[in-house]
Structures are given as structure tokens and as C-alpha cells.
Amino acid sequence: MRASDAGETLAATVNPMGADQSVIWESDEPTVAAVSQSGEVTPVGVGTAVITAKSASNETDN
């Protein structure tokens, strides 16, 4: 993805099926790629970024 590209929206699946499906999205390099809480990734600058989704119900777990 290049900074001039349009963003993309990611999706996450939380298991088991009955669990809270809410996720928290994070970018390890927000100056390269920003991610909204709806999973929309927007290119910002040059470089590499890792986008992570984690369960909102286990927010303190890594």
C-alpha cells in the first residue's frame, strides 16, 4: 500500500462464536499506516507497519 493509495478495511474474527466480537485495532507505526476502530487502514507515510486486532474483552492481554 502506498501513501497515495486509498485505504482498505480489514475484518477480524473472534472465537468462540458466542464471545464478544468487539476488537481493538492498532498500528505499530501510525506515521506509516493509521487504523480506525472500524478496521479502516489509511496509508500515511513511507515504511512498514503491522496492524493488530485484539479482543476488546481481553484488552490488557498481549
Image (cartoon, helix red, strand yellow):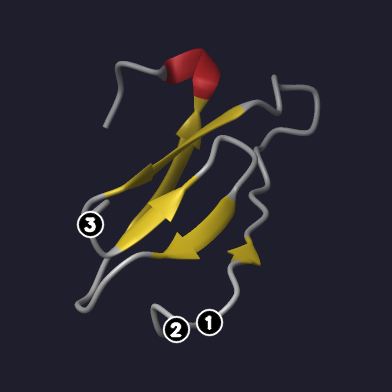
Reply above or below: 4 against 49. below
Q: Are marks 2 and 1 in contact (CB under 8 Å)?
A: yes
Q: Residue at x 30, y 23 (%)?
A: 61
Calculate the distance from the C-alpha at mark 3 to the C-alpha at mark 2. Answer: 14 Å
The percent coordinates of residue 40 (x first, y second) are: 60, 53
- Image quadrant of residue 2? bottom left
- Which sits earlier in the primary sequence, circle 1 or circle 3? 1
Which residue is identified by label 3? 31
Residue farthest along the right direction in this orientation: 18
Q: Which secondary structure lies at badge 2?
A: loop
The percent coordinates of residue 15 (x first, y second) are: 66, 37
The percent coordinates of residue 24 (x first, y second) are: 49, 31
Total tally of numbered discs in the picture: 3
Which residue is identified by label 2? 1
Q: Residue at x 39, y 49 (%)?
A: 52
Q: Is residue 4 left or right of residue 45?
A: right
What label sits on residue 32 in the rendered view? none
What label sits on residue 5 in the rendered view? 1
Q: Amino acid at mark 2?
A: Met
- Image quadrant of residue 17? top right
Q: Which secondary structure lies at badge 3?
A: loop
